[in-house]
Amino acid sequence: MDLILYAVPGFFLLIAIELIAEKVRGTAYYRVNDSLTSLATGTINQLINVSKALIPFTVYVAVHQHFAIWNLSASWLNWLVVFVLWDFFYYWNHRLGHEMNILWASHVVHHSSEEYNLTTALRQTGTGFLSFIFYIPLAIVGFDPLMVLSVGALNLIYQFWVHTQHVGKLGWYEWFFVSPSNHRGHHAQNTIYIDKNYGGVFILWDRLFGTYQEEQEDDMPIFGIRGAVQSWNPLWVNAQIYAQLIKDAWRTKHWWYKLTIWFRRTGWRPPDVEEEFPIEKNELEHFSKYDTQVNAWLKCYCIIQYALTATVGIYYSLFAEQMSLGQSAMVVGFVLWATFSIGALMESKQYAGVLEWIRLGVFVSGVVSLMSPTVWANGLLIGIALALPLLVFGRWQNPPSHSNTTVMMETSSKQ
């Protein structure tokens, strides 16, 4: 049972509540383009997790059957112990995700948003293929694989609520548990917060291993990463660091660097490549958020299309086991196409309109093929009705209209 999938309605309910709080308090923690990108990456993450779900589970089962030291029962005490141990291994998985190039290439997706709200929690990587390896020791100790996978899901569900700016410091709670305050620091690009606060549920690991940093009122977090992705394309958000690593490995003249760049400290580049192809990082004194301007109708259209795409993704998550390999590939491919197309619309790409019309044609054709002959016309009319806002109000053919939201702060920049 996928606990995270069943938690999705609760996630969206809390997002709705936070949006109400945003309206009541007059804050500006949400932007449509940023939030839809976060939700789109979350949809991709869920689809890929469903597609590869059997791989880690099969490995857990095999290790548990052949190498388990003990056969631990599912008592309440063992549930508590495995929950704490999972978080301990999560700390090291998370920490290495910030300290090694190849792991950061995957984890960077979660930090790429320059906003901090509950949709940011859902901005998850689609390339975290090997993270389950960190939890294999739990199977070796003897914890049942179902227990291990369940506490992992509970750990991630807990982490959802800490991605908010509407909750301040929580007193004694901050000493033991991850909270919105100390996790805001984790998502900040200010020098003082970089590589801090890795815990999933318990902040005790950070206090124990020297990676804790309290949120400072005189140095409030500026969210995002120094090498900003500057795109609403969820596929590029997933691929950006991999692409940079591949280019650097190709360009360097030294074979040793080609082989080891993947496993070196995050941000390390071959000296010859860095000299010839320098990369400028954000300076936080006058930090500007990436933004693009599209009209309100197109924003509404993108929201509607994302909702439809997410519905397809949820349907796939529920019934993937009953689908053939070909059907699964078609559904996953369609969702990837849809999220890419929505991102292109929000960036006002020249090709976005054509891409979207083709996508809608494929979608309507699929609906029509599944409907009886007496109602197929209704499906076609629905597709046309959904496309009408794009036809009348869309401005994808115009050059991208960019604007910058500048955040002023007094802090030193990362070297």
Image (cartoon, helix red, strand yellow):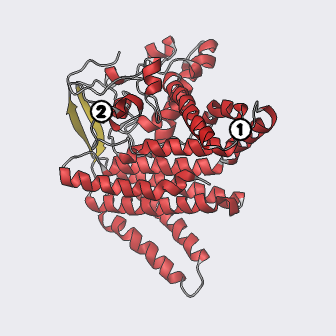
Left or right relative to 202: residue 174:
left
**Quadrant of res 281:** top left
Residue at 29 percent across and 64 percent down: it is 393
**Residue 368's x, y, as percent?**
56, 76
Q: Is residue 348 visible?
A: no
Outermost residue to the bottom? 374
| Amino acid type indicated by mark 2 | Gly
Q: Which residue bears the numbered disc 1?
A: 72
The residue that appears at 24% across and 20% down in the rendered structure is 411
Q: Is residue 154 left or right of residue 330?
A: left
Label 2 sits on a secondary structure element that is: loop
Residue shown at the point (57%, 41%) measured from the top left: 152
- The image shows a total of numbered marks equal to 2
**Where 304 falls versus 273 (above or below)?**
below
Disc 2: which residue: 171
Task: Count neighbours of disc 2 (C-alpha within 10 A) and say few if under 14, some if 14 to 19, many if 20 or more.
Answer: few
On the question of residue 213 being in view, the answer is yes
Outermost residue to the right:
66
Image x and y of residue 378, in percent? 48, 81
Q: Is residue 13 left or right of residue 240?
A: left
Which is more N-terminal, label 2 or label 1?
1
At horizontal 44% and vertical 76% (from top left) the residue drawn is: 382
Q: Nearer the viewer, residue 275 or 287?
A: 287
The front one of 154 and 160 is 154
Q: Give the numbered dot on residue 140.
A: none
